[in-house]
Image: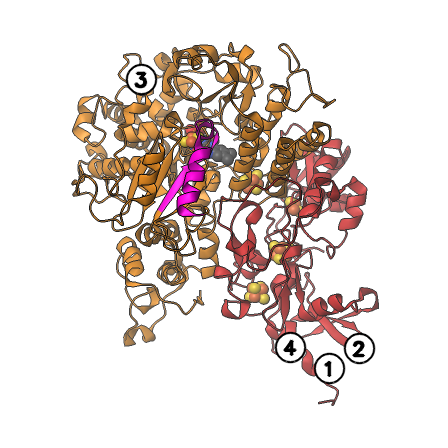
Chain colours: A orange, B red
């Protein structure tokens, strides 16, 4: 195609950032210096365009190097990849982490989502505004720009803030729990250069990573991943058993702690044998939709079209969720091994690991793990000498919850906008690059290791009949010991809250948000709900991604609902009207209610908008955007005093059964 | 209008029910096509007879028995044994809300048929409160993905902003844009392959844009006007039409439409000249024309001035 580019050149730094990713250009046709000989031939067509999937990595490369994407830089990327500039702009402007206007190198993301708001992010927001000016692109010579962020996946350490600093290499730092002083250090640290603790060599310094392992100057180092697991080291752990016990950067440690035994077993069983074990285990997806994993793998493996792809969904952005982060930070090799097994089972040679952009440490640990595994022949053309060829490509999201939706993730990887696609066709038939694809959550995949080590039937004996195996729960909010808990399916909500130490001294429970922003509020008198897929469903709730966010009597429910509504408004991809405009109207109505508007007028309006979003939206985001609000009205009794249509919120009342449960959004496959 | 099919391959016939009536259609037929054949009216906005369905607006939703959510008629294919309701309470509710949500956020004054649908479904876009003030030019285009100022909900947010007038041939009035994606698809790989425009931003702040919102003359636009041809709302219009509407002189009832063959080259595109007061006020092309499918180039679309020079200059 004939590109028409703007007449603006990239700086040397920007060119270098892009060219280090893509290699040096071959000729004037793909962005190099134009030679006379270039005029004797034309390069174009499919060969020039088939690297479109490198668009997102190229945008990251520039954003990581200089902190924002200039017109000249976008031009250079377009020429290198033969992408029309209007399309590249469409993609770049889709993501919250990219800026298309100049801003300081350092950007602070302050979480203002539910758990962090409950822990005082409001005051921190004011502090940042006072120091750095309004959120956005950063003003004048401020040392940093800042944004209010949706959940950063560090809710166990609320309130959380993350700073990213562009450079070569880029750096990151975390303040969680963020104290005013810690936040100031994130916002005002010096301009790059050597780290506080000197340029500590990377643990695997011969393997280049996107981020420098040391924090930028002034910022303090983050506690280890095991800090998120209150009972780390417990002998009952299966999924978390290595967290805190092994060095997450050492392959030797991993192997001596039982690593790669499952892959060896898989190679012995053969692909069909692996699928049989996984099917027998009763494992269902942990990403929110609870779809049987064996069935998904089998359907993918059976497709005649080739190649097949595996996508590991590590976009973890459901507010309140941080389980995948802890696994990736604390036991990254387990995910690499599990992906290799999944790829083997479904007949894929390439697995894409799509990790959310706000997880720099997890990214660092995974990049290290993939390099080491490749070096030792555990990835690559001949995995463990078996003749099976498999490799992993890591792709980083850039601030878009919707990219965790199982078809939007394809668009994002392919270098398109992360917009969900209509189903049918389902991913197992036409997924990534239009080919048969299995998409699985991180926690789902790492469960395959115990499945193979124990055998499917033995795994199935753990938990309940309908929900087998161990499960991770993300406890946050008003409990004494927030963090990641592993329990076999079957425990009740009350058991879990108790394990986390219950509410703080002198406080009482007000509500629990189950399943995240797309989930449901339940009352303190419903703590006997069994935390199983079937138990939650029977109670008209859903487990979603395992979020258990506890609110006590200090919680400001109207403010929380407004935050949930703002989240969906911000994260809607904008494709379909019910969600694009419905989420705006929902937020407006909740804001009016907060400032005293009559529920008699607003609640029926909310119900009507919510019903249309649930019925007529394209994807699970719009379909579940009213779940939490509805349950706050119907189950908690908020705003329902003078709403005639409201069911009785009292115990034993007729709470609406199973609202737009995300489990149902991906039903038929 | 039907899309011409050059070599129809024989297709299996399937039986299904629409609103309780049995229908028999070739496999692969969409619910919308089956409804049209059966004489059942289904409102559509983002559907285009020359484009692949994007099923974005959701005004065409129907209820498929047994399905958890409603399905877009324009893209869902009828399956054997499927039972479809096009006028159930659930369908009417979602259609009403889609019309209200659009009506409250977009200027639909030049969208054909929408007033009639609003009436039919009892839509009242005003019930979300007074409309917010239009944004100044450039403000929506500068919005950062994933952030917004919440406000107090007192006024209903809209997409309204001044029209973009940056060339002599056509005007982009995005206050009227429902984000149907049709212009982008027509400009991109479905027809023109110019890729001058895309969907930028996301959520409510999503908008049609050139790269960095540069003016059209600085973009890859070749002024084929194929985006205008497919725009369902009048957001894109000939400068002649835009100016005449502004001056209150636009009058479709007084216009004649004459379809003829473009005289510029040998391709033989059909052009339809819309004439008011003996002046050409806009040019379109029949969507069922096998040469154009509604598409033209800048000459056929905009090169008509010489026809009406009557020795007065
Ligand atoms: C808006 C939206 C966001 C989602 N985000 C995630 C996510 O971050 N991680 C994830 O694993 N699944 C997410 N899902 C669920 C995925 O669509 C998909 O069901 C899941 O990745 C499948 O993996 P599993 O079968 O292993 O659970 C999301 C779904 C929706 C509708
Ligand atoms: S429901 Fe929302 S997020 Fe999903 S496709 Fe529609 S607009 Fe996009
Ligand atoms: S006039 Fe043609 S080239 Fe220009 S934006 Fe419209 S479709 Fe694209
Ligand atoms: S400008 Fe017209 S064709 Fe383009 S998206 Fe808007 S309404 Fe649709
Ligand atoms: S990190 Fe702030 S709510 Fe999750
Ligand atoms: S016409 Fe079917 S979704 Fe728009």
Q: Which x, y percent locates residue B253?
A: 83, 65
Q: Do marks 4 and 2 share a subunit?
A: yes
* Circle number at residue B308: 1
The CB of the residue at mark 3 lies under 8 Å from ligand 1: no
Q: Earlier in the sequence, mark 1 or mark 4?
A: 4
Of the two numbered discs 1 and 2 on the same chain, state the one appearing first in sequence: 2
Give the magenta-colored segment's residue range. Answer: A107-133
Quarter occupied by residue A329: top left
Relative height, residue B212 to residue A425 (above, below): below
Q: Count neighbours of disc 2 (C-alpha within 10 A) and say few if under 14, some if 14 to 19, many if 20 or more.
A: few
B128 relative position to A50: left or right: right
Name the main secondary structure of what is drawn in magenta. helix
Mark 3 lies on a secondary structure that is loop
Q: Chain of mark 3?
A: A
Same chain assignment for discs 3 and 2:
no
State yes or no: discs 1 and 2 in contact (Cβ < 8 Å): yes
Left or right: residue A302 compared with residue A455: right
Chain to which the residue tagged by mark 1 belongs: B
Q: In this rendering, does residue A145 appear at all?
A: yes
Q: Nearer the viewer, residue A647 or B303?
A: A647
To which residue does mark 2 refer?
A: B278
Label 4: how many Cα within 10 Å (few below 14, some 14–19, many 20+): some
Mark 4, chain letter?
Answer: B
């Amino acid at each position: 195609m004939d590109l028409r580019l703007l007449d603006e050149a990239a700086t040397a730094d920007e060119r270098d950032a892009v060219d280090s990713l893509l290699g040096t250009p071959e000729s004037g046709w793909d962005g190099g210096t134009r030679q006379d000989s270039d005029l004797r031939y034309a390069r174009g067509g499919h060969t020039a365009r088939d690297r479109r999937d490198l668009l997102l990595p190229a945008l990251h490369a520039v954003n990581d190097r200089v902190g924002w994407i200039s017109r000249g830089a976008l031009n250079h990327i377009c020429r290198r990849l033969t992408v029309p500039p209007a399309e590249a702009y469409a993609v770049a402007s889709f993501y919250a982490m990219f800026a298309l206007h100049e801003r300081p190198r350092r950007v602070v993301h302050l979480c203002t989502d539910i758990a962090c708001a409950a822990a005082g992010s409001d005051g921190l927001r004011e502090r940042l505004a006072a120091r750095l000016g309004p959120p956005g692109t950063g003003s004048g010579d401020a040392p940093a720009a800042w944004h209010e962020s949706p959940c950063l996946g560090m809710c166990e350490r609320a309130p959380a803030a993350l700073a990213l600093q562009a450079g070569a290499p880029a750096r990151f730092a975390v303040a969680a729990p963020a104290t005013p002083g810690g936040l100031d250090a994130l916002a005002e640290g010096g301009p790059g250069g050597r780290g506080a603790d000197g340029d500590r060599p990377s643990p695997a310094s011969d393997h280049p990573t996107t981020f420098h392992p040391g924090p930028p100057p002034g910022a303090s180092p983050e506690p280890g991943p095991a800090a998120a697991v209150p009972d780390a080291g417990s002998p009952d752990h299966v999924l978390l058993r290595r967290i805190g016990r092994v060095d997450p950067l050492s392959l030797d440690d991993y192997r001596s702690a039982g690593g790669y035994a499952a892959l060896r077993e898989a190679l012995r069983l053969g692909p069909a044998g692996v699928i049989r074990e996984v099917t027998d285990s009763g494992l269902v997806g942990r990403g929110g939709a609870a779809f049987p994993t064996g069935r998904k793998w089998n359907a993918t493996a059976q497709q005649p079209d080739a190649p097949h792809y595996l996508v590991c969904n590590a976009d973890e952005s459901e507010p309140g969720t941080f389980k995948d982060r802890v696994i990736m930070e604390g036991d990254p090799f387990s995910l690499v091994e599990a992906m290799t097994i999944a790829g083997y089972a479904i007949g894929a040679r390439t697995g894409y690991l799509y990790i959310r952009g706000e997880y720099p440490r997890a990214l660092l640990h995974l990049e290290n793990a993939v390099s080491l595994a490749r070096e030792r022949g555990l990835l690559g053309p001949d995995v463990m000498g078996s003749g099976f060829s498999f490799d992993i490509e890591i792709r980083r999201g850039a601030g878009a919850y919707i990219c965790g939706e199982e078809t939007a993730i394809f668009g994002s990887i392919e270098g398109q906008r992360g917009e969900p696609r209509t189903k049918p066709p389902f991913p197992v038939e036409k997924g990534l690059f239009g080919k048969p694809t299995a998409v699985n959550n991180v926690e789902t995949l790492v469960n395959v290791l115990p499945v193979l080590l124990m055998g499917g039937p033995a795994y199935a004996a753990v938990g309940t009949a309908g929900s087998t195996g161990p499960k991770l729960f993300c406890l946050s909010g008003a409990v004494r010991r927030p963090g990641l808990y592993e329990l076999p399916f079957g425990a009740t909500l009350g058991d879990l809250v108790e394990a986390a130490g219950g509410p703080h001294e002198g406080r009482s429970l007000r509500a629990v948000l189950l399943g995240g922003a797309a989930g449901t509020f339940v009352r303190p008198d419903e703590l006997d709900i069994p935390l199983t897929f079937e138990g939650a469903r029977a109670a008209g709730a859903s487990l979603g991604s395992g979020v258990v966010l506890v609110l006590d009597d200090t919680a400001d429910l109207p403010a929380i609902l407004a935050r949930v509504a703002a989240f969906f408004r911000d994260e809607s991809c904008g494709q379909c009207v019910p969600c694009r405009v419905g989420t705006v109207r929902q937020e407006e109505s909740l804001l009016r209610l907060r400032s005293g508007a009559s529920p008699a007028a607003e609640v029926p309006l909310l119900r009507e908008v919510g019903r249309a979003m649930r019925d007529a939206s394209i994807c699970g985001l719009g379909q579940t955007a009213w779940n939490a609000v509805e349950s706050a009205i119907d189950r908690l009794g908020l705003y329902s005093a003078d709403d005639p249509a409201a069911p009785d919120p009292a115990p034993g009342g007729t709470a609406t059964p199973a609202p737009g449960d995300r489990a149902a959004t991906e039903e038929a496959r | 209008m039907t899309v011409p099919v050059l070599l129809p391959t024989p297709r299996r016939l399937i039986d299904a029910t629409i609103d309780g009536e049995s229908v028999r259609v070739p496999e692969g037929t969409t619910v919308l096509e089956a409804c049209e054949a059966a004489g059942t009216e289904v409102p559509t906005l983002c559907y285009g007879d020359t484009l692949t369905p994007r099923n974005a607006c959701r005004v065409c939703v129907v209820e498929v028995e047994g399905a958890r959510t409603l399905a877009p008629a324009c893209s869902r294919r009828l399956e054997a044994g499927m039972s479809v309701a096009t006028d159930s309470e659930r369908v009417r509710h979602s259609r009403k809300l889609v019309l209200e949500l659009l009506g409250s956020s977009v200027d639909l004054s030049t969208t054909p048929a929408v007033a009639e649908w609003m009436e039919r479904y009892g839509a009242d876009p005003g019930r979300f409160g007074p409309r917010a003030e239009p944004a100044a030019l450039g403000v929506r285009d500068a919005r950062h993905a994933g952030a917004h100022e919440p406000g107090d909900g007192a006024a209903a947010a809209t997409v309204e902003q001044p029209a973009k007038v940056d060339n002599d041939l056509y005007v982009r009035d995005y206050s009227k844009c429902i984000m149907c994606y049709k212009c982008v698809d027509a400009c991109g790989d479905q027809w023109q392959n110019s890729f001058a425009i895309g969907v930028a931003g996301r959520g409510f702040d999503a908008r049609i844009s050139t790269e960095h919102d540069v003016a059209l003359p600085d973009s890859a636009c070749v002024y084929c006007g194929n985006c205008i041809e497919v725009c369902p709302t009048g957001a894109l219009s000939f400068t002649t039409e835009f100016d005449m509407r502004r001056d209150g002189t636009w009058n479709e009832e007084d216009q004649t439409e004459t379809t003829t063959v473009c005289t510029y080259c040998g391709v033989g595109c059909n052009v339809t000249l819309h004439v008011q007061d003996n002046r050409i006020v806009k040019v379109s092309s029949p969507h069922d024309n096998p040469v154009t499918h509604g598409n033209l180039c800048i000459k056929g679309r905009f090169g008509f001035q010489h026809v009406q020079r009557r020795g007065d200059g």
